[in-house]
Amino acid sequence: MAKDLLRFEWRFFQRSFGTYIIFGGFLALGFFAGLSPRLSFPEIHTNAPYIITFTLGLLSLTALFPVTLFAAQALLREQDHRFDDLLYTTPVKKVHLLVGRFLLITMLSLGCLLLLAIGYALGHLWADKTTGSFGPFSIVHYLHAFIIFIVPNVFFCAAVICGTAWLTKSKLMIYMSGLMVYVAYILMSLFSNSPLMANASPMSAEAMAIAALGDPFGLSAFFEQTRYWSVEDRNGHVASLTGHLLINRLWVMFFSAGLVGASIRMFSFRVKSNSNKKQEFAIDNAPSEKAIEPIVPQFKAVNYRLKTWFSFVCLDMKSLRKSIPFYMLVAVAAFALSMEMYANIDSGMRIPERYATTGLLVNTLLESLPLFILAAVLFFGSEWMWKSQSTRFESLEKATPASPSIFHFAKITALVVLSLVLVTLGINLGVGVQVIKGYPIHWGLYASLYWFVGAPALLCAVLVVSVHVLSGNRYVGLALSVVILVLTNSAIGQLLGLSHPLVRFAQFMPGVFSDLNGFGYYPNLFTIKMLYSLGLVGTLFSFHSIFRLGNFRKGNITFICLWLICAAMTGMYILKHTKTINQADELHWQQAYEEKYRTAYQGVAQPSVTHIQTTIDLYPNEMTYQVSGSYQLVNKTDQVIREFIVHTWQDIQMQSLRSSNLSQIKMDRAFGQYVIKPAKPLMPKDSFSLHFTFRYSVNPWNGHNPANAIVQNGSFIRLSNYFPRIGYQSELEITDESERAKRTMPAATSIKGLTDAMEQPYPYGFIRWEALVSAPAEQTVVGIGELVKRYRKNDRTYFHFDSKRPIPFRFGLSSAVYEVKKTQHDSIAIEIYYHPRHAQNVTHLMERIKQSLTYCQKHFGPYPFKIIRFAEISNFTQGFAGTAYPATIFMNEEIFHLNLDGFREQDVINQLAGHELAHQWWGTVQLAPDDRQGSRVLTETLAMYTELMLYKAAHGEEKMQEMVRLYEELYQSERGFSEDEPLYLAHPDNVNVVYNKGLLAMYELYMLMGEERINHALRNLLIKHAYPNPPPTTLDLIRELQLAVPLDQKTRIDEILKK
Amino acid sequence: MHLNGCTIHYCPYRMENKLILQDISKTYANDVHALTGISLELKNGMFGLLGPNGAGKSTLMKTIVGLQPPDKGTILFNEVDILAHPEIIKRQLGYLPQDFGVYPSVSAVDLLDHLAILKGITNKNERKNHVMALLDKVNLYAHKSRAVSAYSGGMRQRFGIAQALLGDPKLIIVDEPTAGLDPEERHRFNNLLSEIGEQVIVILSTHIVEDVRNLCTEMAIIQGGRILAQGTPTAFIEALQGKIWSKTIAKNELPQYRARLSVISSQLNAGKLTIHVHAEEPPGAGFHAESVDLEDVYFSTLQPRMHHG
């Protein structure tokens, strides 16, 4: 009997076209996931078992979709079609019926996931093997992930959803339960440190264990098990069904079976009684004798339309009051938004809380609201558009002269109002959080949400309504609008490659608000994008009236033309300004550059820059700056130089390049390369001067370069990156080995080996830098070196900087409306430049700087400048928390404006200040190692050490040990994603080794020889190797350290730094 | 003037409305001929459209109302082509469909108010009074704040007639309005219809012969998408007078009679079968003349004509 029932159920699905579409969809999804891997880590194969399990485990979450869909259809079929009266009065057994359905749903969903896995494997087989590395193909890897992760997960999803169906007998609850599982899973991922969630802090072992056991999808257990796996492990081994993973899988299966059993038991063959009891009222009194006064209807165009429109809108809005989906949406949204807000404030274990600024919360809302708005518009769009038809009220409404377009406008209005309700909810939550945290509220910024979220919501509403109208069917309309919006408005679409602004519809404003720079250039872009989308959707909306209704009235044709023109004009504008970066073209350019210039100019003698004099005019409001400069070049080699090359950067607009002496200058425009042949060949010690002008402008449509961020307020420019450079630039080479192999290119320029010879005398290439920088009067420019003069002229302020002493070819500046706090300490001037509303931490920072200065001067040597500046920059510059330049340190507002109250132990500001300040000894002008193995140890690792010691001085030995434990965690968990090397040989780019492993090594040294001895060694290192003496290598460091200890500890030092 | 104890509003100016259907035809996609060559001319008063299930009554109603365009033919209402301008008829229409639903959890007064706005009663006070009066008229005033979706079948029909009376309709179409109502409710409903039937065109589409007999001044019989007969009930009955005969027979004798005579109806009563036969001359022994009923007219019209033998 059970088999027959199953077969009967199956036939419904077999006959439905949608079933095959879903199957096809999963196969395609798997195929594309395998074909173009988005999850990749260096060193790990694209088809490593780790990646396969990770991907398939993650994708098993998609099982919720078919399970919910199939369950909603199959489990309530008899109820939907009022067949339950008949079915339940037959002698059919509960168990046969229900278990059969459960098995069918499970098997169908497993089928979908199986197709996904097959597609995925096929994708791997089909993928271009040259992009990324591939290990040998083994079906076991896929099978393993399928059996251990996908099968129990599908079983679990099916059990939860079927259980809900049988207990509540409500289609709504089925969809809700699917949604709940999804939301619960996302929230769990937030807290369980899956590599998906950009979580800064590592989790403690206890927390990981709890997550491993608790996560019903088994992924946390997988992450726990593989946490400390090396690269080889991840490439070769599948997860083993042991420990927490085994327990997890077992309980999930048992729980699911139990849930199914319990809910079957509680299911009864009772027809659901209507909560709205249809009451039969006896016809009580006699009918009224009064006659009905007929009222002549008025159809005055505007009045009638307005009233009709308003009536429809009110009806829909009132229906929300009794709508369970609405309350669920609001509840889930409120919960999720609050969680997001707190998560953003909390930021993890490593750094203190952020201040609950309006900017932060508005950014959170901008990032999180769109999901709920889209869900609301899609769901209620389909509900409200088809409400008339599904309740069979349509025949009454359509017999009135109300036109369909009023109906459509009313639906759009209702959806917009609903969206604005959600926005208001978000604002209330944000204000609530700010009140709790006690931070002033910026109301205008919250109000801007109505535009930045409301406008896209309106456009999406118009789209959804248009799609429903044009498709003429509720489910087709819903499916189409979901697909369109997912492809054009969500991250998934971007993952699939649809990221050009012209294929993005009604893009919500990203959360980019900066306290310093506000929204910057984004609002203008946003407006144009909205106009473009408006043109598109207006055309679509008008399409219906013209082509469907055959209403070729002149008015309608005009409208459609209007929309088309709007879309075309904005579209062309966008197209003109958006430059798509073609990866292949880039590589081609790199290859061509190398082939043209490497052999001719690498290693060839060339002159060195000794003195730079430059004028820089900043125009923050136009996002432009203008440079004019001159180089003094000297032939410091012992050879004759007949020609040399000067490289200028693709980003900037080179305007002129000339020399004072007569010389031939040939320009290679394609590469920004100038070949210069002085009239008289340069003899050793000869000098030569070069003059140039260039300009840089930010094109907002291509985003801004974070290192060249000339923005309205809080600009930061790494100038030295964009000034012309002498000689062949090996950093422009293609670094990817497989890419080079594909193009049959020889090996790239590599860094020097640790023991390679060093040129004597060492060509430091230090320069004297002088700059006259101008900015609008209200802004202050923070440069490097000493500030010689400052004056005001014509509404602009001029700053004359002079490095006074030689510095590396590394200079930059920031510019903003700053407040400044100044003080003197040990005859060094300390200046902190900060945003007027970010004063909270300035005093604390000042104290820390003083203490760090005292420490470093005492233990390492005098500070090389007369001034030290700290300047805050906007978060339009991303990529670092702080960066050190000669005499100036720039800090990102994200770090500068942290809430240190009660979190003094996680005093990241102190750590950062100490670290960056230490670079004035280990790096910049004193210790400037060359480019070889281990060179970064001498700058970063020593700075980490200094940071550690400063931390100990401020907070004590115990707290320092906590910090060390934290870095141990970091090092171990990062280890599996990149090559581990001995510290002293570390490649400069190996961040995990140089920073994390380095800190741990220094701590071991500290435990071995003590702070004083280390400092003594470092001091000597400086004396011997600081500029202008030849720079050190890690071997020199080891030697100095060994000199400072008795014989029995010398080999230990070797061990620590060489393992 | 009184009729059935109800008062009719005396309007000094009586407008004569005219609805003309010419050769209306509609064929569905699966080649089903729903309507073929329907031509009717209607004036003020109750017009009964009588026919079995599936005859095309609802299709015709929907076509007139503008919900379904016909494939062929014209409809003129007071000389206006309403197929070309459906909004014209909708402004003067009251329509009670055969089967309708309502939005869930909306009260009767709110829903009626909504429809009133759609029908062009834009003045708030006027509308409020009108809605209350209508609800009172159909005896729903006591339940006006209840959700219509919670009403019983009879109450919902009453709501339906209330909304069909909104405004000042010149053409009222009711499609199978009394199906599912208990006798008392049916009676009241019919009274209500009669009351308004004098000044406007009311088309009553039904398969209950008795209602047509009691209410309608003109009628048509429709079957298989075609009008089989059109005229006044009295005229039909007159025409058939003296041609209907009845006899009580045994159940198993029926096939013999069917073969020989034009048996228009048969009724089983306590094991015995009473048949009505349509014949010009007395059809045989045991038959006596029956006074003609509209039901006889109906059945005889539907019955395919027998070859007189």
Image (cartoon, coloured by chain):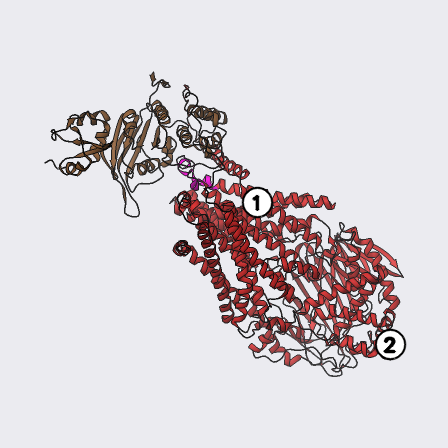
Q: Which chain is brown?
A: B
Q: Amino acid at mark 1?
A: Met
Q: Could you tell which of marks 1 and 2 lies nearer the N-terminus?
A: 1
Q: Tell me if residue A534 can be seen.
A: no
Check disc 1: other Cα within 10 Å, few if <14, some if 14-19, many if 20+. Answer: few
Above or below A641: residue A262: above
- Quarter of the image for residue A443 reads top right
Tell whether position A392 is magenta.
yes
Q: Quadrant of the C terminus of chain A?
A: bottom right
Asked whether the beta carbons under mark 1 and mark 2 sit within 8 Å of each other, the answer is: no
> A384 or A156: which is nearer to us?
A156
Q: Which residue is mark 2?
A: A1045
Image coords of residue B281 (percent x, y): 11, 29
Hey, which residue is sitting farthest left in the picture? B309
Q: Tell me if residue A712 can be seen.
A: yes
Q: Which chain is red?
A: A
Q: Chain of mark 2?
A: A
Tell whether position A714 is magenta.
no
- Element type at marker 1? helix
Give the residues drawn in magenta, as a range.
Answer: A388-408
Hey, which residue is sitting farthest top in the picture? B1
Camera-nearest label, 1 or 2? 1
